[in-house]
Amino acid sequence: MTSPLLQIDRLTKRFGGVVAADAITLDIPPGEFHAVIGPNGAGKTTLVSLLAGEVAPQEGTIRFERSDITRLPVYRRSRLGLARSFQISSLFSDFTAIENVALATQAHRGHSFRFWRDARREAALRKPARAALARVGLAARAHVRVDRMSHGEHRQLEIAMALATTPRMLLLDEPMAGMGPEESVQMVATLRQLKGAMTILLIEHDMDAVFALADRITVLVYGRVIASGRPAEIKADAAVRQAYLGEKESSGHE
Amino acid sequence: MTASFDPPLEHAPASRLNGRTAFIVAMLAILALLPVYTTLTGDSFVMTLFSRVLILAIGAVSLNLIMGYGGMVSFGHAAYLGIGGYAVGILAKEGIGSGFVQWPVAIAVSALYALVVGALSLRTRGVYFIMITLAFAQMIYYVVIGLERYGGDDGLTIYQRSRFGGFIDLNNKTVFYYLCFVLLMASIYLVSRLVNSRFGLVIRGTRSNERRMRAIGFPTFRYKLVCFVIAGALCGLAGALLANHTSFISPALMHWTRSGDLIVMVVLGGLGSLFGPLIGTVAFLLLEEALSRVTEYPDMILGPVLLLVAIYLHGGIEGLLQWRRHD
Amino acid sequence: MLYFIEQCLNGVQLGMLLFLLAAGLTLVFGIMDLVNLAHGSLYMLGAYFAATFAILTGSFVAALVLAVSASLLAGMVLEIVAVRRLYGRNHLDHVLGTFGLLLFFNELVRLIWGPAGMTLPLPQQMLSGVEIIPGIYYPVYRLVIIFATVAVAALLYLVVMRTRIGMLIRAGAANREMVAALGVNINLLYTLVFGLGAALAGFAGVMQAPILTVQIGMGENILILAFVVIIIGGIGSIRGAFVASLIVGLIDTLGRAFLPDMLHLALSTNAAATLGPALSSMSIYVLMAAVLIFRPEGLFPAASR
């Protein structure tokens, strides 16, 4: 049994009186497509923030490729190969799509204390950027400014940015948030192509996508893991059904 | 943010480029030929005024680097004018009159101060950053006032301009003017290379979305710090030039309202554009000059003008030039 | 020792004046998200108003009341005419706009009152010293300042914490859209808050006038001290402003009083004479730098902004 790529051990985060993450323990082996689901307020975004390094836990550890990254700053985790996409698109809105992705490429190709040469013409940055854009289907929109792109294109660009950092693992935070049915289908296709090529942790609300893509699913409720296993097991799990029964009425809210 | 970035080369609409380029070329031509006008008419006041414009424009260019491109609103930038100037003044008083020593020292001390201030301030952002840079500038202002030996509150007269062996004679006003002009052009060129280099893209990306920059793997703090130091060093050079220009240096030069003036110059010209700082400096100093001739209370007009610019004129004067192209 | 106690009291006095300024600044920033560089101008106007009213009425108390009222009014008018157009902008626009106001007010004061500055004479009863502890005499007026400013601070606390309007202020600071959605006249609230800040600044200006100064540009120096207070105390936090004001007031006063002598012990006469005044004015900035290193969000950070 190969050692897990990502090992989360009793990860706990409290915000004042609220326990957003309650002793979360989870192992993700390399190559797995792992989905995390749960009702609103379950602590999914907190989990991503903890994994990405934007907040520090009170207890617990995170190990990536066996080294302890629990207190590592955000940029160092990216350097180690852990790439993250944002639930609310966080892009460089006054730059074009390719400029956005080229920056991601640049972060992982040597240092940037170069003051003279025009980096916009650096093939070593632009070629991989184009490739990443092509992979998510945005090749034709490379020279469009981000603030002129649609919401769906922003979500695709988020994925492209993550890919451009040549990651070992992707942390995708609700990539389909706010997407219409057509766009979601395309996103699922994109994710399916990535499946197997790298390890993926997907946070999502879209159940169709989750059950179509995931190798294993973890269910979070009020910050605790209440179930974790193969999709078929999760579908049949009584605790999961109870947690979601109340959710069925309000599904579609995002 | 109200910056008007140089658009990616693939994009700039031809007509806008032409209008703006023509304006800038015209302005540069006038500045380059000014000494000819002075020689013909004997009016040396104009050259003195515009030497000051050129020097302060270098300061504005340096502030634009961190503020326009980097999004770091520093309200303490005049400190570097003072540090550079006092480096020249103090060395001159202590008997070291060679520009080959004075000017590198001016640049080095400014860079050092920027390093310390930046290291402490850049961990903060927004309003905090503005107030902290303001406080540090005021600190050094008070320190310099306390230096009795170098004139304190009254300032320090510099009896001899920096000497450069036989290479260049700064006492010749025309030569000095062209030196300032060349250094300004060099600064602008330097910035133009900088902002499209890898380093410049990191700075601009950090301004656009620092959280994103960190997420893709950039240690943004150290890049901002280096940018801050470069800007401080360049402004220190401007300070050395200023000390030579006025043959006098006083703490008033680094009073925080002078930092405010620099901010105004940068904003008036349009943030984050190459020639904006020059346009803004020209506009501001000419406005100041004109107002002081028209009234005994120039700030009563200048003040409200600044307020109106803040309220209505996003992107400064260059924003005005681009107004017609707004969709 | 006596000198030390006297300097401590002076430090507390300075601290309380700073608190009044910082409180106004931090309220305006916390609620309207506005950086106001012209706050020092309101402090200056308070002092000038008082000096003029003192000449007109011959009474210090009347001048105080009138000047504070005038400051309140001036603040509200300023908010309605100019400041409110800056809400929602980025901080650079605030800096630029209020800097313009600062220049305007300095010039306006010069136009109306002339460049020379004015004086505000102390009322007769307060001219003497009083024996607060056996052997230590302290000027009555300085004690008045301390008590008056503490009283105002307590009043401010009561208003913000115990009244309905204070509750609206705190709510507005936490979530202004919500407060507006609840039907509160948010514009009026902002005007009142700004006026309150102006009144506090004006009051501080009047109180310090008899012992310090009434001159153009007096607002700038103390404004920066107020900024240092806010940085150390934490933006948006009145409690932080209170603690930080006392700390800054004490350190600045004690630093200026004792550092030169301490330097004389450590360095040569020449060096101490040169560096003394310079270093003693640096003490609060060194403190600020220390806070920035160890606790960049301030000592008592309020809700994040």
Image (cartoon, helix red, strand yellow):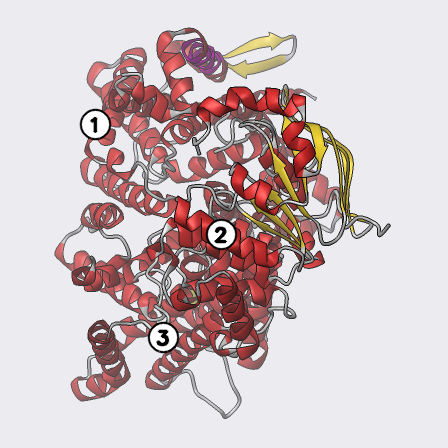
Residue at 43% x, 6% y is C162
Q: What's the mark number on residue C77? A: 1
**Structural crowding at the residue carrying mark 1, measured as other residues with C-alpha within 10 Å and reported as few (<14), some (14–19) or many (≥20):** some
Query: Of residues C214 and B287, which is closer to you in this image?
Result: B287
Q: Main secondary structure of the magenta part?
A: helix
Q: Residue at x 64, y 63 (%)?
A: A166
Residue toward you, B176 or A153 = A153
Marks 1, 3 in one chain? no
Q: Against B60, is C33 above or below?
A: above
Asked if both marks, 2 and 1, belong to the same chain, the answer given is no
| Distance in Å between CA atoms under marks 3 and 2 | 31 Å
- Residue at 40% across, 59% down: B68
- Percent position (x, y) of residue C17? 46, 24
Q: Nearer the viewer, mark 3 or mark 2?
A: 2
Q: Look at the image and give the residue range highlighted in magenta.
A: C147-160
The residue indicated by pointer 3 is B9
